Amino acid sequence: MTEASAGKSRSIAPIPSLSRQRLADQIADVLREQMLTGTLQPGDPIHERDASEALGVSRTPLREAILILEAEGLVETSPARSPIVANPSLEELSDLLLVQANLEALAGELACAKATDEDIAEIRDLFQRMVDTNDDPDTVGFFKTDMAFHEAIVRATGNQPLIKTHQQYNSRLWRARYMSSRTRMGRIETMRDHGDIIRHLENRDAPATAEILRRHLLQAIANITRILRTERPDTAS
Amino acid sequence: MTEASAGKSRSIAPIPSLSRQRLADQIADVLREQMLTGTLQPGDPIHERDASEALGVSRTPLREAILILEAEGLVETSPARSPIVANPSLEELSDLLLVQANLEALAGELACAKATDEDIAEIRDLFQRMVDTNDDPDTVGFFKTDMAFHEAIVRATGNQPLIKTHQQYNSRLWRARYMSSRTRMGRIETMRDHGDIIRHLENRDAPATAEILRRHLLQAIANITRILRTERPDTAS
DNA sequence: ACTCGTTATTAGGCATACCATATTAACGCG
DNA sequence: CGCGTTAATATGGTATGCCTAATAACGAGT
């Protein structure tokens, strides 16, 4: 027993709210992680009974987790079918990136006005880490730093709805952008653009920061289009 | 038989899509409507047992509906508390509107390139309806047309993620924007701006359309700020 | 042999029953 | 009289069982 068994004596532990997270949220986290690692791949069905048994939980919270992921656009449900992991078409990815480009442009603009020096220092640290690990073969680690860099910029705006929306778009774009980043040109472009971004940000040059971020994301559309065109020449309805 | 496989010739009416909808979705629709009409007001708790009984459903789909609305930001949940109808602070409304302004600016830009003539005709019809009903005391009807006008522009882009995100932001902003539109100045400004918007849209002038839409929404921030400052001088953390 | 119909199995949707915990009120002690 | 402790109650969280619908396989009839 830790502290929560008998009487609730003066709340010694200030961390109860974290462990008190809903099971559905925890399950959603696990499923998200499995989508990232590839344990769950686009198009894979998620059977209620199988998945709940595999995770050691009952069907109810599993169903609720599916609801959460559905709202985020990570799974798709059909009336009498098992929910399936979203498998966005090229058109949908393009649409998502177009919106994301503008969200990040807005974020860059706001960040120039609102970011503290500590925020910018953190962003620069993330950039530095990317430079340091540029030759590292760990593509996942490099990419996660890439994502963290962008998220840090958005977080520096302090605009909660923007942060949340941006995060959800990132979740849906994770796989596509990861594939895009694995190309050699992807890394080179990323490094150059990120250098420009942090420079404009430190200069508090809002228009320039917004524009480079928009271009950076729009470039991703071209990259992903090229990759998907070769991998799956059609399937985009 | 015609379409109903089993022998249930009770109702031949083609309402399968409606009855086929998940109960949770229907409940979420009802709750959203109640938030719009004021039956549910910001801060009101939604007790699982009471609400499910009142709607004649069990707690399970009611809980699922809550999850849907929570993902949309319309209700907020705390670990051991009944979920409550979201009561966004002025700061949060401002943040939401700032993002929405940029989403609509993007939509206007895209619509200039992608909207069909029929799309634009529909948007003009909505504008005309606003002009016709300008003297109408039915503030809700007028406001709904206002919202429909903006949504039609976004829909004309054909960008599904953008449409969905815009719709969710509108849901969260509904009440605040409705209050804003009830002021006389609100209507006058709305009419003038909408006239400019449809004009630029018909000229396919993307930069102008984007800019007027952004300004239109940013103006709403000022309006709402003024209203809330008088109604509830604080409560904004 | 092929096609259509019927049945069985499977899986998701909903309801209900159970459990754990937080909050509040009442009682007792200081 | 006030504060602390404890117990009761209410509420959200979780598990499970039943119901309905879709699908696939098998059998019969042409």
Image (cartoon, coloured by chain):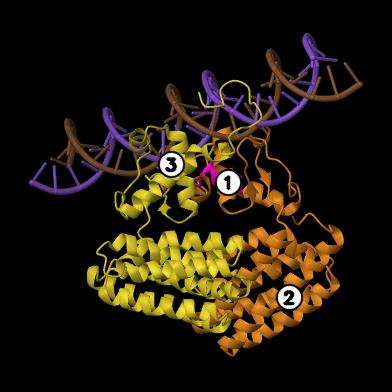
Chain colours: A yellow, B orange, C purple, D brown
> Residue B22: within the magenta?
yes
Inspect the image, locate mark 2, and give the three-letter code of the amino acid beneath it.
Answer: Gln
Taking the spot 44% from the left edge, 81% from the top edge, the residue there is A196
Under tag 2, what secondary structure? Answer: helix
Label placed on residue A27:
3
Residue depicted at x 49% and y 48% = A68
Report the mark closest to the observer, 3 or 1. 3
User: Where does the magenta region start and end?
Assistant: B21-28
Give the spatial CA distance, label 2 vs label 1.
34 Å
**Image coordinates for residue A205, horizontal then vertical, percent:** 56, 82
Res. A149 mark:
none
Q: Chain of mark 2?
A: B
**Looking at the rendered structure, which numbered label has been put on residue B219?**
2
Q: Nearer the viewer, mark 2 or mark 1?
A: 2
SS under mark 3: helix
| Amino acid marked by disc 3 | Ile
Residue B179 is one of the magenta-drawn residues: no
Rendering coords of residue A202 (x, y %): 53, 78
Q: Residues within 10 Å of mark 2 (few under 14, many from 20)?
A: some
Total labels drawn: 3
Picture coordinates of residue B50, whole percent (x, y): 68, 33
Label the magenta part by its dominant secondary structure: helix
Q: Which mark is residue B26?
A: 1
Q: CA distance from mark 3 to mark 1?
A: 25 Å
Q: Quadrant of residue B5?
A: top left
